[in-house]
Amino acid sequence: MDTTQVAKTVVDLVPLAKALAIGLTGIGAALGIGMVGAKAMESIGRNPEATGKILVPMLIVSAFAEAVAIYGLVIAFSIK
């Protein structure tokens, strides 16, 4: 096999790696935020007086889950 034949068989996997990096982290963050929001609303529905105690931790956890998606975006941009 000469070099021209080898060059024709090489597959560029960089776009696939970028898509997987952002796609999987986006799905994970979406699931995490969805579960946190659902459980927070369920607990507020059961005990409306605890809204102030539930809302702030819910927002903090949602921000951390969103940060995971941002890290995935940064990784996708850094893959060369």
Image (cartoon, rainbow, N blue to C red):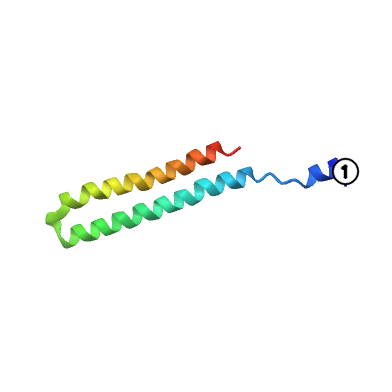
The residue lying furthest to the bottom in this view is: 46
From the top left corner, tell me how far across and down residue 56 is, in percent: 22, 46
Q: Quadrant of the C terminus?
A: top right
From the top left corner, tell me how far across and down residue 24 is, in percent: 49, 51
Task: Write down the quadrant of residue 39 in the picture.
Answer: bottom left
Residue at 29% across / 58% down in the picture?
A: 38
Q: Nearer the viewer, residue 37 or 64?
A: 64
Rate crowding at label 1 as few (under 14), some (14 to 19) or many (20 or more) other CA atoms within 10 Å: few
39 with respect to 49 (left or right): right
> Mark 1 sits on what residue?
2
From the top left corner, tell me how far across and down residue 33 is, in percent: 35, 52
The residue lying furthest to the right in this view is: 1
Which secondary structure, mark 1?
loop
Please give the count of numbered marks on the rendered protein. Answer: 1
Residue at 33% across / 57% down in the picture?
A: 35
For the residue marked with disc 1, what is the amino acid? Asp
Above/below status of 48 relative to 74: below
Residue at 20% across / 52% down in the picture?
A: 54
